[in-house]
Amino acid sequence: MILSITQVLEIFKKTKSLLGKNGMYKNSFSSSTCKLDSLVKNSFIFCVVISPLFLLTVSGWMTRIVVICALLAMVFSYKNNSKKYEITCNSKVTYYKRILFITLCSPILAILLGQLFRGQYEWPYYDSPAHILICIFILLAATKTSPYLVKWMSYSFPMANLFGLISILHNPNLFWGSARLSTHALDPLDFGSLSLTFALISLVSIKLHDNDSKWLIVYKLIGFVLGVYLSILSGSRTGWLAVPIIFVLWLYYDHVKIRLLTKIASTLIIIVMIFSSYFFSSNVHQRVNDTTKDLSSYQWNTSKPNDYTSVGARISFIRIAAYLFEKKPLSGWGDGNFGSVINDPALNFSLPETKKMALGAGFHNDITANMVRSGIWGLIATIALFLIPAIFFMQNLKSGFKKQSDVAFLALTFLTCQFMSSLTMEIFNLKYSASLYGLMIAIFCGQIIYDMSKQSNINNGEKK
């Protein structure tokens, strides 16, 4: 028996020596953990990259993919929280992170404060703001995953427009008539706005691919043309004003020095293109003429109700919202809880149909809708969601590092499209559009912070 125990001890010692200093099982466990971490990271990147693909064609796609991205980001951040990264945060990066975190928290805080002042608590109000809130985890993960996240994501936008065209050709949504085409996933307003947004992102993202093939440039240009075509088919003017603004930004604020003569020539070409679309597209011609007519016919100082027109109704919505905000600036009204004052004499400038639409369908404007819903808190949150990222992107647009400024310009393109669209439709109160906005802002900001941190480390290394 003693001999057998001795033999067992000898075998144990030999096994221990063969396992090495840390032990084979420990190494095996460590290897499995690394593989799992890599799987989580790659899954997160994959879900982010494909996130725009089916937004135009599959109902509920964006809300689901954002939740998946957020869950993967949470797991990734938890597993890598204690690890030492080559990329570390300096005080400036930490400051930007905190400001952006607060910005993404602001919609849900606005709902909470508005309900506290009203003494009315309803969970459905938190649905869309919660989808923006969870994008904090996506932002945090994006600062640590890959320097090519935005570049890879840019491949999906032209394909999303292509899927949108195929869907319309196969089974168009004719709910608003054959002159306002869309897919069954979106109404023409949202479809026109998003297809145009994807078009401009496809065009601007060419800047991210200096050394890639000409076929990739052709692919991006096709995505741009398809998106513009789909926007025209939708008959929606939502976001059209973003086009000249982005072209002007590209000409006058790009980091590449462009000669004055080139700028003048490019400006003239843009003007010719805009006028050509007006004269050669009956849809564009009609929608522009309707806008001009609606604006000129709207009466500001009259006791007689204005006729119901698309533009006129939106002007009346703003005036109704201002009246409601003045009555309850701290608490807001919630959704559709202002029926008791909707027929006040001060609102006689609008028809009953206009008032009924404001009461039931909302205000078709993010700023006015949220200040009526949550008072001053909703107004602050909505402005912050646009303004804080815009300031961040504008600051990085002037960066001396091309990749960083290119991503900032791409982000400004998206932000400009979304802001212009938000003037005539609501973004933050719809789950899918709020999810898209939160995801894109998180990815763009995360990528820029990644590059800022990396560059800071390089500079610190050179100083040492």
Image: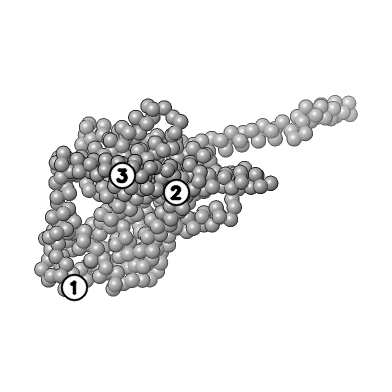
Tag 3: amino acid? Ile
What is the spatial separation of the Cα atoms under label 1 and label 3, in whole angstroms? 49 Å
Which quarter of the figure is the N terminus placed in? top right
The residue lying furthest to the front in this view is 261
| Residue 181 occupies quadrant | top left
Circle 1 crowding by C-alpha within 10 Å: few under 14, some 14–19, many from 20: few
Is residue 420 visible to us here?
A: yes
- Mark nearer the viewer, 1 or 3: 3
Q: Which residue is mark 3?
A: 264
| Residue 362 occupies quadrant | bottom left
Residue 253 image point, x, y percent: 40, 48
Upstream in sequence: badge 2 or badge 3 = 3
The residue lying furthest to the right in this view is 2
Q: Which residue is mark 2?
A: 397
The vertical placement of 32 against 415, above or below, is: above
Name the element at disc 3. Answer: helix
Q: Which residue is mark 1?
A: 346
Residue at horizontal 27%, vertical 50%?
A: 241
Residue 176 image point, x, y percent: 16, 45
- Mark nearer the viewer, 2 or 3: 3
The vertical placement of 386 against 153, above or below, is: below
Residue at horizontal 37%, vertical 59%?
A: 382
Tag 1: amino acid? Ala
Q: Nearer the viewer, residue 418 or 398?
A: 398
| Residue 247 placement, left or right of 318 | right
Upstream in sequence: badge 1 or badge 3 = 3
